[in-house]
Image (cartoon, rainbow, N blue to C red):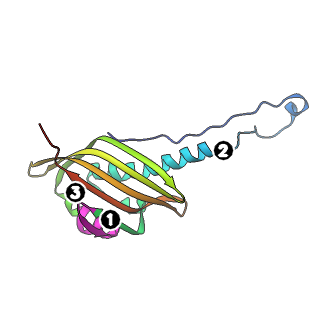
């Protein structure tokens, strides 16, 4: 299940009273509150994660480099993959080319802010079907550290792993 959060925008028009009621000019709007700013930042961080996840489900990660810092670090299932550019070129793109489908489900994300960083913890299930018809179903977790760079949230570090579900 993809989590897509709509950007929240609130504009509260203040009705002028008395002589000011006839004054020309744009309506006054409420100043942004810390909660509104936090909600926008939370939504922006979740959007970065959702865009990356959507690309994987499309089996086309082209254009996802903008979601990652140039000096990012990617760790996957016990290995260091280097920067995202390296991971994309030597691991993710060739791997996605071998899949018929890749679907996420039971997705949940928790984001918290620590100074200028956002820390995201994701849990999910995923199902991969290869072009040859082999099926892999896994439980996955990911931890990402994001930082605002050039006005946009970028993934600095991503660590993900998966395991076979236990039982039935």
Front residue of 63/14: it is 14
Assign the N terminus to one quadrant of the image. Answer: top left
Identity of the residue drawn at 75% across and 39% down: 28
Per the image, the residue denoted by label 3 is: 96
The mark found on residue 32 in the picture is 2
Mark 3 surroundings: few (<14), some (14-19) or many (≥20) residues within 10 A: some
Q: What's drawn in magenta, residue-wise?
A: 76-93
Q: Are marks 2 and 1 in contact (CB under 8 Å)?
A: no
Q: Are marks 3 and 1 in contact (CB under 8 Å)?
A: no
Q: Pinpoint residue 137: horizontal percent, then vertical percent.
A: 17, 45
Q: Are marks 3 and 2 in contact (CB under 8 Å)?
A: no
- The CA distance from mark 3 to mark 1 is 17 Å
72 sits left or right of 32 in the view: left
Relative to 124, residue 160 above or below: below
The answer to whether residue 26 is seen in the rendering is yes
Q: Is 51 one of the magenta-colored residues?
A: no
Mark 2 surroundings: few (<14), some (14-19) or many (≥20) residues within 10 A: few
> Disc 3 or 2, which lies upstream in sequence?
2
Relative to 137, residue 12 above or below: above
> Disc 2 or 1, which lies upstream in sequence?
2
Q: Secondary structure at mark 2?
A: loop
């Amino acid at each position: 299940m993809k989590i897509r959060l709509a950007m929240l925008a609130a504009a509260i028009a203040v009705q002028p009273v008395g002589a000011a009621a006839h004054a020309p000019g744009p309506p006054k709007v409420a100043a942004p509150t810390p909660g509104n700013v936090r909600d926008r930042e939370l939504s922006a961080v979740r959007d970065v994660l959702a865009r990356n996840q959507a690309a994987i489900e499309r089996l086309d990660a082209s254009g996802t480099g903008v979601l990652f810092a140039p000096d990012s670090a990617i760790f996957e299932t016990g290995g260091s993959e280097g920067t995202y550019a390296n991971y994309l070129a030597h691991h993710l793109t060739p791997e996605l080319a071998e899949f018929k489908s890749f679907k996420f489900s039971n997705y949940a994300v928790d984001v918290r802010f620590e100074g200028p960083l956002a820390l995201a913890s994701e849990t999910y299930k995923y199902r991969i079907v290869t072009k040859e018809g082999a099926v892999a179903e896994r439980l996955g977790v990911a931890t990402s550290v994001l930082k605002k760079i050039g006005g946009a949230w970028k993934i600095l570090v991503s660590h993900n792993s998966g395991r076979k579900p236990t039982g039935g």
